[in-house]
Image: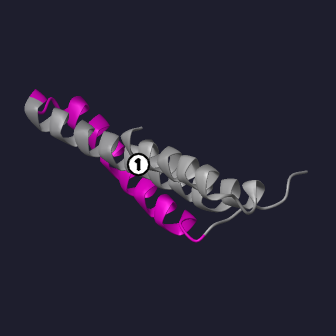
Amino acid sequence: MSEIHRHESHPDIVKRLKRADGHLRSVIEMIEAGRPCLDIAQQLHAVEKAVGEAKRTLIRDHLDHCLEEAAGPLGRKQRQSMDEFKDITKYL
């Protein structure tokens, strides 16, 4: 059995995903009710953004905590590479 793995950002991620879940349920209801496609697309966009932000937060948190811990102390050049890697993840 694996150990419980929690970070400070996890409650925020759960909050974002619950919001996305609510939006997704609304989208389903809108489709079933025959709402206009523009309204549905706007709600789908909200779902997509909420899930994407949750994913980015989780990845950044992992890099900031788990990867840093695993890498240990780094020299200046290695630190620069690690920082560049972390910066590029904002484009995920």
Three-letter amino acid code at the position of disc 1: Asp
Q: Is residue 11 magenta?
A: yes
Q: Quadrant of residue 51?
A: top left
Between 5 and 24, the one nearer to me in the picture: 5
Residue at the image position 64 percent from the left and 62 percent from the top: 65
Between 26 and 91, the one nearer to me in the picture: 91
Pinpoint residue 22: horizontal percent, then vertical percent: 35, 52
- Of all residues, the one furthest to the right in this rendering is 1
Residue at the image position 42 percent from the left and 38 percent from the top: 92
Which residues, given as a range, are shown in magenta? 8-37
| Neighbours of disc 1 within 10 Å: few (<14), some (14-19), many (20+) | some
Pinpoint residue 88: horizontal percent, then vertical percent: 43, 42
- Of all residues, the one furthest to the bottom in this rendering is 8
Horizontal relation, residue 55 to residue 3: left or right: left
Q: Is residue 92 above or below residue 77?
A: above
Residue at the image position 84 percent from the left and 59 percent from the top: 3
Pinpoint residue 32: horizontal percent, then vertical percent: 25, 30
The rendered magenta stretch, by its main secondary structure, is classed as helix
Q: SS of the residue at dot 1?
A: helix
Between 24 and 72, the one nearer to me in the picture: 72
Horizontal relation, residue 65 to residue 11: left or right: right
Q: Which residue is mark 1?
A: 21
- Whether residue 36 appears in this view of the structure is no
Q: Is residue 7 above or below residue 46?
A: below
Q: Is residue 66 magenta?
A: no
